[in-house]
Amino acid sequence: LPVRPRVLFFARDWWISGVNSFTETLARYLNDNDVDATLVFPTMNKANAKHLPDLPIVELDLEGSPVEQWKRLSDFIESQAPCIVVPNYDYFTSALTPTLPNNVGSIGIIHSDDVEHYDHLHRLGRYWNAIICSNRHLLAETIAINPDFANKSSIIPYGVSVPQSITIPKLRDVGTPLRLVYCGRLTQQQKRVLDLV
């Protein structure tokens, strides 16, 4: 029987965020399609553990010096090979990308237009086997940073699962205000939050 491909999604915390929502949605999709997708936490903020999804999870509880932590991370990743590593925003783990053995692939994700994601791409993109961008703008910026990235870059748009039928509650009174709750950072450039108002 063929071995199910293994994908390791790294994270340092689990709170309400677009990155974590995207990771959870993608990991669920992969697990439903004969891929072994696991969330890996080198360290875990126990206060946020209550938000963890019902997906396979590994907590490494790394301690010690950075060199000792990288050694344990490297040993763990090699023990999972062959596999694909998705460091996400875990820049500490991502720093291992250039040292990964040939039977471990890596996928970098450009989650947003933040400078830190472009810096991450600039430093480590050449070592990633594939690059995922969440929209066309990020794909264009990725290729502008390094035209050689074009052949290994693609788009997986973020999205929210919407049921087939949605029931919108009717307001009791025409004069009753409509109340909206926004869960996200109050930034205009990325979130266009002022456009909501």
Image: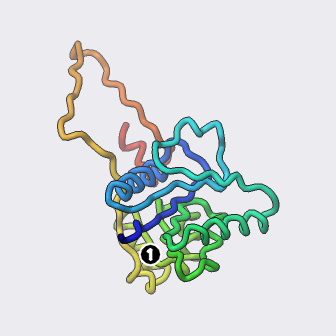
- Going by the picture, which residue comes out furthest to the left? 165
- Asked whether, in this view, residue 167 is left or right of residue 88, the answer is left
Instruction: In the rendered view, tell whether residue 11 sits above or below residue 153.
Output: above
Give residue 146's position: percent from left, percent from top.
48, 82
Q: Residue furthest right?
A: 65
Q: Quadrant of residue 10?
A: bottom right
Regarding residue 154, the answer to whether it shows in the image is yes
Q: Position of residue 78 (x, y in %)?
A: 61, 72
Which residue is situated farthest in the top direction here?
173
- Give the camera-side residue of 137 and 102: 102
Residue nearest the observer in this picture, 2 or 138: 2
The residue at 47%/60% (across/down) is 111
Above or below residue 166? Residue 179 is: above
**How many marks can you see?**
1
* Relative image position of residue 63 (x, y in whole percent): 77, 55
Work out whether residue 188 can be spotted: no
Farthest front residue?
1
Residue occupying image coordinates x 52% and y 38%: 51
Residue 105 vs 23, above or below: the answer is below
How are the colours assigned in the image? rainbow
Q: Where the N terminus falls, by quadrant? A: bottom left
Res. 97 image quadrant: bottom right
* Percent coordinates x, y for residue 35 in the rendering: 39, 62
The answer to whether 76 appears left or right of 28 in the picture is right
User: Is disc 1 placed on a helix, strand or loop?
Assistant: strand
Instruction: Name the residue located 33 percent from the left edge and 54 percent from the top edge.
Output: 32
Q: Residues within 10 Å of mark 1 (few under 14, many from 20)?
A: some
Residue drawn at point x = 37 percent, y = 37 percent = 197
Residue linked to disc 1? 130
Of residues 117 and 30, the one nearer the viewer is 30
Q: From the viewer's perspective, is 82 left or right of 61?
A: left
- The three-letter code of the residue at mark 1 reads Ala
